[in-house]
Amino acid sequence: MLPPELALTDAQKAAIKGLREAFAAENATALAALKAIFDEARTARQGGATRADVFAILVKGRPIAEGLRPAVKALHEAIWAVHTDAQKAWIVANRPKMPGPLGAGPLGGRRP
């Protein structure tokens, strides 16, 4: 769900919806395979499987996710192109502040 502060037009909403639907249709097989792996991992964990067992299940999805990476990047870029410059500025200004080497430091956020 997009925040109302972005003030997307109906045309922008339709364009983004169309991009997302096209992505889902073009990548349905890979997305279904990932969902099946996640479901298998969840079922295993709920059934008492060890972390190592669950990890072994999830690792099966890595090549699928890596194969999807170019399509996901293209989707993000296409959606970004739908936004106006003002909307892009709002998105950048309101990005969550992430702790870590590129985010908040020792005084501004948690770091181990």
Image: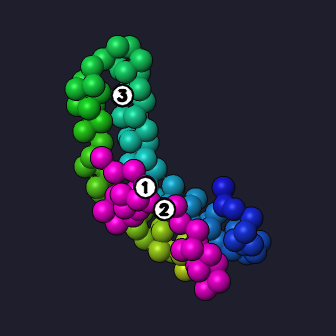
Mark 2 or mark 1, earlier in chain: 2
81 relative to 70, above or below: below
Pointers 2 and 1 in contact (C-beta within 8 Å)? yes
Q: Tell me the distance, in whole angstroms, between the alpha carbons under discs 2 and 3.
A: 30 Å
Pointers 2 and 3 in contact (C-beta within 8 Å)? no
**In the structure shown, which secondary structural element does the residue marked by tag 3 occupy?**
helix
> Mark 2 is on which residue type?
Lys
Which region of the structure is painted magenta?
Answer: 83-112
State the residue position of label 2. 97
Mark 2 or mark 3, earlier in chain: 3
Which image quadrant is residue 10 in? bottom right
Q: Nearer the viewer, mark 2 or mark 1?
A: 1
- Answer with left or right where residue 96 lies relative to residue 44: right
> Mark 3 is on which residue type?
Ala
State the residue position of label 3. 41
State the residue position of label 1. 109
Please tell me which residue is depicted at 30% across the width and 57% down the height of the picture: 67
Q: Per the image, is 96 magenta?
A: yes
> Mark 1 is on which residue type?
Gly
**In the structure shown, which secondary structural element does the residue marked by tag 1 occupy?**
loop
98 relative to 78, above or below: above
Estimate the x, y position of residue 24 in percent, counting from the top left. Answer: 51, 55
12 relative to 85, above or below: above
46 relative to 38, above or below: above
